[in-house]
Amino acid sequence: MRSALLKTCLALVILMGVSATMAAAQTPTPAVPDRLAKLEKDVAQARSSGDNAWMLTSSALVLMMTGPGLALFYGGLVRKKNVLGTMMQSFGLMAIVTVLWALIGYSLCFASGTDFIGGLGHAFMRGVGAAPDADYSATIPQQSYMVFQLMFAIITPALITGAFAERMKFSAMVLFMVLWSFIVYDPMAHMVWGKGGLLNASLGGHFPTLDFAGGTVVHITSGVSALVCALYLGKRLGYPQEPMPPHSVVLSFIGACLLWVGWFGFNAGSALSSGSLATSAFVATHFAAAAAVIGWALAEWVRNGKPSALGAISGAVAGLVAITPASGFVGPMSALVIGFVAGVGCYLMVAKVKAVFGYDDSLDAFGVHGAGGTIGALLTGVFAVSAVNPVFKDSAGNPTAVGLIEGNAHQLLNQLVGVATAWILAAVGTLIILKVVDVVIGLRVAPEHEIQGLDLSQHGEEGYNLEY
Amino acid sequence: MTKIEAIVQPSKFEAVKEELREIGVDGMTVTDVRGHGRQKGHTEVYRGREYTVDLVPKVKIEMVVPDNLVEKVVNAIVGSAKTGKIGDGKIFISRIDEAVRIRNEERGESAL
C-alpha cells in the first residue's frame, strides 16, 4: 500500500518534469535571419555609440581651440590695453557664428546645392536630427556632424582677428564676420566638403582636392583674408617705430598648448569616426607639431642665437596648420617632414618676408595660417598614400594612387586648383566686404581710441586692475 | 636734515634695506622705477622683430635723515649695493629745509 503510493508520487513527479521540459521546448526559437538582423542592429548601435562619443568629444575640443585657446594665444600677443578687446573678438564669434549656423550657415555648407554653395534644405535645422546623413558620416547623428562642423566655422573667422588686432572697431568686426561667414566660409566649405561641391574629393567634385580637416577651407581662407585686412586697414599707429612686444608670452603659451590639444579633435575628429583613421590622423597631427617646434626654434637659434618660447609655440601652431589638410592622408614620417618644412617656412614668413614688405599683420595670421595652410595643402598632394586613406578607387573598387609619391602627379595639380580657389575667393570676398563695412560703419577706431586701447574704448573695461 | 635718494639694482634692495635698519634709519619711501644711466639696455626679439629695452628696472629709496647720519647711510648703501659693474645705481644727497609730522604737527628733526 505504502509502496504503491510512493510509486504513484514518483511517477507524478517524473511526469511533471517531462511536461515542463516539453513546454520549454515548445517556446518558439527566433528564426536565424531575425537573430542576425537584431545582431546587426546591435553592432551598428555599438559602432554608432563609439563614433558618436569621439565626435562629441572632438566637437568640444575644437570649441576649446577658440575659447580659451586662440583667445589666450592672441590675447597674450597684444599690448595689455587691448587684451580684452582681442579676447572678445574670439568669444563674440563663438556666439555669433553659432546663431548664423543654426539659421542657414550649416545648410549653405552641407545641404545639396550647386557646385559653389549649398541650398536651403537644412535651413533652421530642418531635417538635422538623430538620423545620420550617410553622404558625410553613416554612423553618427547628423546633429553631431552639424555641431562638429560648427566649431570649424567659429575658429576660422576668429583666426583672421590676429591681422587687424589692436585697431578695428568691435561693431565693424561683427558686421565683417557675419558677411565673411556667408561670402567666404560657407561657399569654400561647400566646395571642398559639401555634397556636389566643385572640389569635393569623395562626393563627385570636378577637381578632387584633398583637404582632410581644413587646410584650404580654414587656414588659407582665414590667412589670406587676414593679409587683405592688414593691407586694407593699414598699420597700427606707431608701427613699426614704437615697440609693441607681446604683453604676456605666458598667456600665449597657455593658449598654444590648448590649441595643440584641441587640434587632436580638429584633425582626428575629421575622420568622423573613432577607428584607425582617427588614430592615424592623431599621430600625424602630433608628429607634425613636434617637428615644427624644432624647425622654427632651430631657425631662430641660427639667426638670433637664441631659441625663444614664443618661437617654439608659434612653430607648434605652424606645424598644426600645415598638417591639417594632410592629417588623414599621410603616414607619420611624412608628417614629420611636413611639420619641419612648415616650422622653418612660417618662421621665414613672419621674420623676413613681413619685414621686407612692411605690412602690419599684427599677430601673423597670414604668416602662420596663410603660409602654413598653403604649404600643407600642396604637400598633401605630394605625401598622400592609399595605405592611410584609400580615397581614390578604380572601377573595380581597388584603391589607386593618391599622392605624388605614389605616382599620381595629377593630384598636385588638383591641390593647386583648390589652393588657388581658396586664395581668390578669400582675397576678392574679403576686399568687397571690407569696402562695404568701411562705407557703412567704418573699420578703424578713432586714433585717440587706438591710443587709449580697445578695452576701454570698445568695451568700457580693463583687463588688469591690479591696483585694487 | 638731509635727503638721500638711492637708486639701486632691484636684486640688491633687500640687502640695502637690512643694512639701513641696522644703522638706525627708521623710515623710507620706496618706488619701483625705470631708467638708465651709462648702463645700456638689452634687446628682445619677438618673431624676428628686435626691441631695444633701454630703460631698465631699478628701485629708488628715499629717506630724510639727521645730518650726522649721512655718511653712515651712504657707506651702508654703497657697501650693500655695490657689485662693481655698470648699472649699480646712484646716490643723490640734498639739503632739506623743514619737515612736518602730519599727525601732531611736530617740526624739524623730531618729525623724522
Image: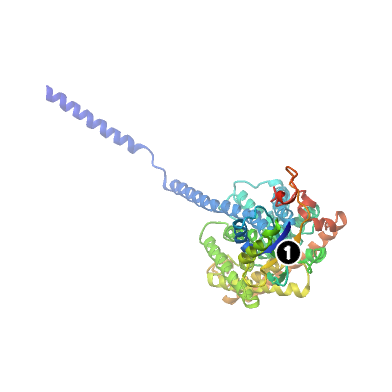
A242 vs A194, nearest the viewer: A242
Residue that sits furthest to the front in the current view: B68
Q: Quadrant of the rendered structure where residue A5 is?
A: top left
Horizontal and vertical percent for residue A175?
Answer: 79, 53
Q: Which residue is mark 1?
A: B92
Can residue A201 be seen?
no
Q: Nearer the viewer, residue A460 or A63?
A: A460
In the image, residue A373 sits, relative to residue A452, either above or below, namely below
Is B95 located above or below residue A49 in the figure?
Answer: below
Q: Position of residue A422 (x, y in %)?
A: 72, 66
Q: Nearer the viewer, residue A79 or A141?
A: A79
Which chain is disc 1 placed on? B
Amino acid at pointer 1:
Phe
Q: Is residue B98 left or right of residue A247?
A: right
Residue at 59%, 48% (x, y): give it. Answer: A131
Q: Nearer the viewer, residue A456 or A391?
A: A456
Write down the quadrant of residue A367 in the picture. bottom right
> Label 1's element?
strand
Q: Position of residue A237 (x, y in %)?
A: 81, 63
The answer to whether residue A140 of the structure is visible from this angle is yes
- Quarter of the picture containing the N terminus of chain A is top left
Residue at left 75%, top 73%?
Answer: A355
- Whether residue A429 sits left or right of residue B32 in the image: it is right
Q: Position of residue B73 (x, y in %)?
A: 66, 61
